[in-house]
Amino acid sequence: MANLVEWIQGWIQDTPGESIIGIAIGEDFYSSARKCPEDKLGMVLPPEEALPLLDYEFLPDYNGHGCNPVYVWTQNYILAISEYDGSVGTVIIPRNPTMCKVDYI
């Protein structure tokens, strides 16, 4: 099982100087376990409001998706949820133009 809050907070802890500025939560079309109220979907929320809505377990494996898509903004990066054929992971890209290793998303 996986937990979005643990993924997000783990990345923040491993990236010195970064803190969460805002989080937007999208609708999970595949699961009825979503905790985010419809009036909050797509809004940029402060972390103290958004993180409790993402604190649940889900299966990240193929055909096991069941988490909300999210965008997490920090000072220098955007963290997002990737999904390929039901397998869920994270993607981290620079927030602003910068020299970096460019890879597939």
Image (cartoon, grey):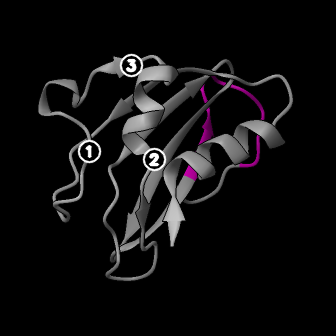
Q: Is residue 58 left or right of residue 32?
A: right
Q: Which residue is mark 3?
A: 45
**Main secondary structure type of the part rendered in magenta:** loop
Residue 42 percent across, percent down from the top left: 25, 28
Answer with mark 1 or mark 2, whichever residue precedes in sequence: 1
* Circle on res. 35: 1
Residue 6 percent across, percent down from the top left: 61, 50
In this rendering, the label closer to the viewer, 1 or 3 = 1
Q: Which residue is mark 2?
A: 55
In this rendering, the label closer to the viewer, 3 or 2 = 2
The residue located at (32%, 50%) in the rendering is: 68
Q: Amino acid at mark 1?
A: Lys
Answer with mark 1 or mark 3, whichever residue precedes in sequence: 1
Q: Amino acid at mark 3?
A: Leu
Name, please, the residue furthest toward the bottom: 62
Q: Are marks 1 and 2 in contact (CB under 8 Å)?
A: yes
Residue 98 location, quadrant? top right
Range of magenta residues: 91-101
